[in-house]
């Protein structure tokens, strides 16, 4: 009985970590769309759209690194 309970707790813990990671990813996608104007394609050319989104992702990652460096890991997700 004790092993079964432990396995269930571990399974629940893994599931909760997965759900939290999904929520973090949804937050990042939402921030990219709203703060970095990446909710649409700028034109009809694949290469131009690809460059546009690559620059947006680079800018997002740079801002996240600066937040972490200047404000610490705790504040990274609290500031927009």
Image (tube, rainbow, N blue to C red):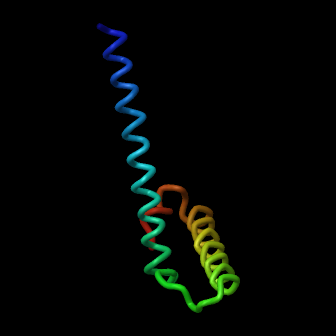
Residue at screen point 62% across, 63% down: 69
Q: Quadrant of residue 51?
A: bottom right
Up/down of 2 relative to 29, above or below? above
- Left or right side of 20 for 5: left
Residue reaching furthest to the bottom: 43
Q: Quadrant of residue 9?
A: top left
The image shows residue 28 at horizontal and vertical percentages of 47, 66
- For image coordinates 47% across by 68% down, the residue present is 29
Quadrant of the snapshot with the C terminus: bottom left
Task: Choose between 68 and 11: the one closer to the eye.
Answer: 11
The relative height of residue 26 versus residue 42 in the rendered view (above or below) is above
Depth check, front residue: 72 or 53? 53
Displayed quadrant of residue 50: bottom right
Determine the residue positioned at 34% across, 23% down: 8
Q: Is residue 68 left or right of residue 21?
A: right
Q: Which percent across, then down, holds residue 74? A: 48, 56
- Residue placed at 40% from the left, 49% from the top? 20
Image location (x, y in percent) of residue 58: 65, 73
């Amino acid at each position: 009985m004790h092993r079964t309970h432990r396995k269930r707790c571990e399974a629940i813990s893994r599931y909760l970590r997965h759900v939290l990671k999904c929520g973090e990813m949804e937050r990042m996608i939402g921030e990219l769309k709203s703060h970095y104007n990446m909710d649409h394609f700028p034109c009809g050319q694949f290469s131009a759209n690809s460059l546009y989104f690559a620059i947006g992702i680079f800018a997002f990652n740079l801002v996240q690194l600066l937040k972490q460096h200047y404000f610490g890991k705790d504040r990274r997700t609290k500031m927009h």
